[in-house]
Image: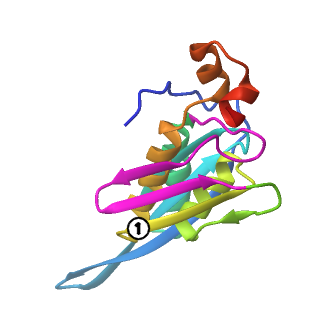
């Protein structure tokens, strides 16, 4: 995991996307007890994203808890011209994800859990592939891991002492 600064959710307007809701059954001598777990991704569609997990007896309550949890886990991601600056691999548990920049008009080519993260962060054109585990918990975390490893083209240009255009078309 990269060491990017965590952000406060109070000054940012965030939109939430529900990734999955799981029904969990506990069997006791009195019958079955149902509870729900929800995974939610929040983002401002301008480079800030976070994910959260909520568990409760009701679906709506689980989603509300997940949104609160997601607002505590915000990270900033470099988005450049509606896409990501470079290719990147991300890992978490058994999930492996690959994200690659795409030319304008391509759209978000990604599956369920990855799509929610990429749309919440504000990426408009990207190619993405999930390899390994398809568990939504781990796919979301692997996608955020890949996005956190991305380097901002302006920072790279400053480090190398060249213009931003030369970073891409060097």
Magenta run includes residue 95: yes
Q: Nearer the viewer, residue 116 or 170?
A: 170
Q: Looking at the figure, which quarter contains the C terminus?
A: top right
Q: Nearer the viewer, residue 41 or 115?
A: 115
* Residue at the disc numbered 1: 131
How far across and how far down the image is residue 47, in percent? 67, 38
Which residues lie in the magenta part? 76-102
Q: Is residue 152 above or below residue 34?
A: above
Q: Is residue 37 above or below residue 2?
A: below
Colour mapping used in the image: rainbow
Asked which secondary structure carries label 1, the reply is strand
Q: Inspect this view and state whether residue 48 appears.
A: yes
How far across and how far down the image is residue 2, in percent? 41, 32
Magenta run includes residue 40: no
Horizontal side of 100 relative to 38 (left or right) equals: right
Q: Residue at x 50, y 38 (%)?
A: 148
How far across and how far down the image is residue 84, in percent? 65, 45
Among the 4 quarters of the image, the one containing residue 17: bottom right
How far across and how far down the image is residue 40, in percent? 54, 57
Among the 4 quarters of the image, the one containing residue 36: bottom left
Q: Looking at the figure, which quarter contains the N terminus?
A: top left
Horizontal side of 26 relative to 136 (left or right) equals: left
Question: Which residue lies most toward the left here?
Answer: 29
Horizontal side of 117 relative to 22 (left or right) equals: right
Q: Nearer the viewer, residue 168 or 67?
A: 168
Question: Which residue lies most toward the right here?
Answer: 105
Q: Inspect this view and state whether residue 73 appears.
A: no
Dot 1, crowdedness within 10 Å: few (<14), some or many (≥20)? few
Horizontal side of 45 relative to 155 (left or right) equals: right
Q: Nearer the viewer, residue 27 or 116?
A: 116
Q: Residue at x 65, y 29 (%)?
A: 153
Q: Residue at x 36, y 62 (%)?
A: 95
């Amino acid at each position: 995991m990269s060491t990017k600064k965590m952000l406060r959710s109070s000054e940012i307007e965030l939109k939430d996307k529900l990734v999955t809701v799981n029904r969990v059954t506990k069997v006791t001598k009195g019958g079955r007890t149902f509870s729900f777990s929800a995974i939610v991704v929040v983002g401002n569609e301008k480079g800030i994203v976070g994910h959260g997990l909520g568990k409760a007896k009701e679906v709506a309550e689980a989603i509300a808890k997940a949104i609160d949890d997601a607002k505590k886990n915000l990270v900033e991601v470099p988005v450049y011209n509606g896409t990501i600056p470079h290719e990147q691999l991300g890992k978490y548990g058994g999930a492996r994800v690959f994200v690659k920049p795409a030319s304008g008009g391509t759209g978000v080519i990604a599956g369920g859990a990855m799509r929610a993260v990429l749309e919440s962060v504000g990426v408009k054109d990207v190619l993405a592939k999930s390899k390994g585990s398809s568990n939504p918990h781990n796919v979301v975390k692997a996608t955020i891991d890949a996005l956190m490893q991305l380097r901002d083209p302006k920072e790279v240009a400053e480090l190398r002492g060249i213009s931003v255009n030369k970073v891409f078309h060097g």
